Amino acid sequence: MDEEETRDLLKVRDELERRIMRLQRELEDSRRALILIERMIVRKGFQKPTVPEEVEGVRMEEVEGGEEEVGVSIRGRDGTLLGHLRVEERDLYFYPREDLPFTESIPPFRAFLVEKVLMGMRASDEDRASRGEITPDEVLSFEVSTEDGRLKMVAIHNYGGERRLREIQSSLRWAFEKMYEKIGAR
């Protein structure tokens, strides 16, 4: 190979490297845009219900920009209010009804909701982060808050998009409905 061919190959290589960098930036921008669109869909996709009297302590609050947080009542199949789900930017907060003795030890809270659903989603996110599909700070995390043994709140951070929101909402409904059946039988 002569010098001129080598120079031509170096130019082609440089151009390919620049193109790869441009495409990577475009991909990152597209991912960010998709995340923003998913957040807007979640925010606009739910009607803001009036908060029932049973959960008067939980209400819609104004957040930055004068927007309201989105709140959803979680009810059993028979219409029993089980709790209230508040949706913020990237976070969900579920507040079980305070007058019901929900605890972490009542099945299927730990085995289904925590271990299967939430830990499963976290493992999936960690796998996606290791492949570079999402950043490590976008991995789902969660906290369970209790007071005197009773569940006070389940906080889920970086829940993902609308599909995940529906899955979490459905899982909360099912788990707390089963828990309600168990405490009702006592």
Image (tube, rainbow, N blue to C red):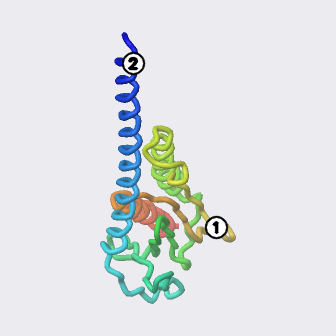
**Which is more foreground, mark 2 or mark 1?**
2
Spot occupied by residue 109 in the image (x, y as percentages of width and height): 51, 57
Spot occupied by residue 51 in the image (x, y as percentages of width and height): 42, 86
Q: Nearer the viewer, residue 90 or 1?
A: 1
Three-letter code, disc 2: Thr
First-in-chain label (2 vs 1): 2
Three-letter code, disc 1: Thr
Looking at the picture, does residue 5 appear above or below residue 25?
Answer: above
Mark seen at residue 6: 2
Q: Which residue is drawn at the image coordinates 35% and 39% (left, top)?
A: 19
Name the image quarter holding residue 67.
bottom left
Q: Nearer the viewer, residue 158 or 119?
A: 158
Q: Residues within 10 Å of mark 1 (few under 14, many from 20)?
A: some
- Is residue 49 rendered to the left or right of residue 147? left
Spot occupied by residue 26 in the image (x, y as percentages of width and height): 36, 50
Q: Which residue is drawn at the image coordinates 45% and 89% (left, top)?
A: 53
Secondary element at image label 1: strand
Mark seen at residue 75: none
Residue at the disc numbered 1: 146
Looking at the picture, does residue 163 appear above or below residue 63?
Answer: above
- Is residue 101 rendered to the left or right of residue 71? right
Looking at the picture, does residue 15 appear above or below residue 58?
Answer: above
- Is residue 30 rendered to the left or right of residue 140? left
Indicate the quadrant containing the N terminus: top left, top right, bottom left or bottom right. Answer: top left
Name the image quarter holding residue 79.
bottom left
Spot occupied by residue 113 in the image (x, y as percentages of width and height): 48, 55
Looking at the image, which residue sits at the far right? 148
